[in-house]
């Protein structure tokens, strides 16, 4: 059967293949990371590896606690790669870099997010990006997620710096122009359309929706929202531009309906996008976070899921248990569909991720300790991928 690539299941040759440059835990890794695109190409058999994503915490204590958690999760799950996000408006640039290099040095294959927001340096609108890429390269990082990024904290609209980057496409082009093929470059994909391209459907228009629009439509506060077909075409055209400019793979925004992801992959292939498409999986840890994130992104919530969350909303422990059950069900459907990797937006937590892998029968009784979870909250908002236009 299809399995995750975990330490306990690796043969010596498999471990050598997947982490050919990984050194013993506790020692610093000095060689460069492999490219994720190469790891995916070299993957043998039907194993489906996990990958994990973390964000910079607000405090030094939070960072210390997260490092311990990252070490545990690396040992327990042996992720194919580990993402480190770049805070809204470049607010965590220094810490994100430090975390990514530390991840690389401790046996993770680091996949560092980089955004175009607030990257002006010494009066040069692109110098911050150039310096960040060079520091990452010098630090052994060989994988970058190219994103436009969210507006700075406290601002509603994203604004380009004069003479700087206007979108993720500009960043992909810059990386390829100035760094050649030094990095595996990932870009964001939006199965339901970018939140900025999703619009409210007025009363009486529901019956006019196409089949594809119905698949990705969502309901919030009694109102229906959807990325209309004409806008979705623009989204797909732009995604194709990013891939044609040099992106090696796509990591998707969170979704809760597997049919939405399947439709997205089908349409990508119809658009001539042939690179790996990695599903981004938001673990359901709490009712409040689930409601906030799904509303922010206008994410489609299947009726059964929405009803169940309403039923459990006053029982935090039951929400976590259900989150593991629902997550395992989604993962199994994705494995059956044939995805290359399962990418978990961990929210800097372990319990639900371990619960999912245990439910799938891939791990057993992993011990998690989340007493320190409050210290690992993010700087700014974290909703799957930073808005990676």
Image (tube, helix red, strand yellow):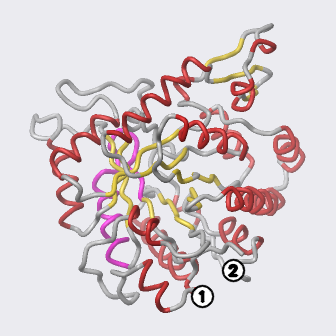
Describe the element under mark 1 as helix, strand or loop. Answer: helix
Q: In terms of sequence position, does the residue under pointer 2 or pointer 1 come before the other?
A: 1
User: For the stretch drawn in magenta, what is the main secondary structure?
Assistant: helix
Height in image: 368 above or below 135?
Answer: below
Where residue 161 sits: x, y (%)? 23, 27
Where residue 32 sits: x, y (%)? 26, 73
Segment colored magenta: 84-106
Q: Quadrant of residue 232?
A: top right
Residue 89 part of the magenta-drawn span? yes
Which of the two residues, 252 or 181, is positioned nearer the viewer here? 181
Which of the two residues, 292 or 136, is positioned nearer the viewer here? 136
Q: Are marks 2 and 1 in contact (CB under 8 Å)?
A: yes
Residue at 68% x, 81% y is 366
Residue at 41% x, 79% y is 19
Q: Quadrant of residue 237?
A: top left
Residue 357 part of the magenta-drawn span? no
Q: Quadrant of residue 246?
A: top left
Where residue 190 sits: x, y (%)? 54, 37
Image-based side of 368 in relation to 376, left or right: right
Image-based side of 319 in relation to 362, left or right: right
What's the distance in space between the residues labelled 2 and 1, CA to CA? 9 Å
Describe the element under mark 2 as helix, strand or loop. Answer: loop
Q: Which mark is residue 363?
A: 2
The N terminus, quarter of image: bottom right
Residue at 69% x, 22% y is 225
Where residue 164 sits: x, y (%)? 21, 30
Q: Residues within 10 Å of mark 2 (few under 14, many from 20)?
A: some
Q: Residues within 10 Å of mark 1 (few under 14, many from 20)?
A: few
Residue at image mark 1: 8
Residue at 42% x, 33% y is 389
Height in image: 274 above or below 367?
Answer: above
């Amino acid at each position: 059967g299809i399995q995750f690539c975990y330490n306990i299941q690796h043969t010596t040759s498999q471990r050598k293949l997947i982490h050919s440059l990984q050194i013993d835990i506790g020692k610093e890794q000095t060689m460069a990371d492999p490219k994720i695109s190469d790891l995916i190409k070299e993957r043998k058999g039907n194993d489906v590896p996990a990958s994990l994503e973390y964000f910079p915490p607000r405090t030094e204590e939070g960072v210390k606690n997260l490092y311990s958690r990252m070490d545990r999760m690396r040992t327990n799950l042996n992720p194919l790669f580990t993402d480190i996000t770049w805070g809204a408006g470049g607010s965590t640039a220094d810490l994100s870099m430090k975390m990514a290099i530390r991840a690389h040095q401790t046996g993770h294959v680091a996949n560092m997010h980089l955004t175009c927001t607030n990257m002006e340096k010494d009066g040069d609108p692109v110098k911050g990006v150039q310096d960040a890429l060079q520091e990452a390269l010098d630090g052994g990082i060989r994988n970058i997620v190219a994103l436009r990024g969210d507006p700075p904290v406290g601002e509603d609209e994203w604004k380009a710096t004069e003479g700087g980057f206007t979108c993720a496409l500009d960043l992909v082009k810059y990386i390829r122009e100035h760094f050649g093929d030094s990095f595996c470059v990932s870009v964001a994909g939006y199965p339901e359309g970018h939140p900025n391209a999703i619009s409210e459907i007025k009363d009486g228009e529901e019956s006019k929706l196409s089949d594809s629009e119905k698949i990705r439509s969502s309901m919030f506060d009694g109102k229906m929202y959807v990325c209309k077909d004409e806008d979705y075409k623009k989204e797909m055209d732009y995604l194709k531009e990013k891939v044609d400019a040099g992106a090696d793979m796509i990591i998707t925004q969170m979704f809760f309906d597997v049919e939405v992801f399947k439709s997205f992959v089908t349409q990508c292939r119809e658009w001539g996008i042939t690179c790996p498409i990695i599903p981004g999986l938001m673990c359901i840890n709490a009712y409040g976070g689930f409601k906030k994130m799904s509303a922010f992104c206008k994410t489609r919530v299947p009726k059964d899921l929405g009803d169940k969350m309403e039923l459990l909303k006053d029982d935090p422990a039951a929400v976590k248990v259900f989150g593991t059950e629902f997550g395992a069900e989604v993962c199994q459907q994705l494995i059956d569909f044939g995805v290359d990797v399962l990418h978990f937006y961990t929210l800097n937590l372990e319990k639900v991720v371990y619960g999912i892998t245990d439910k799938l029968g891939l791990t057993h009784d992993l011990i998690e300790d989340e007493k320190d979870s409050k210290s690992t909250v993010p700087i700014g908002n974290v909703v799957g991928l930073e808005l990676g236009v």
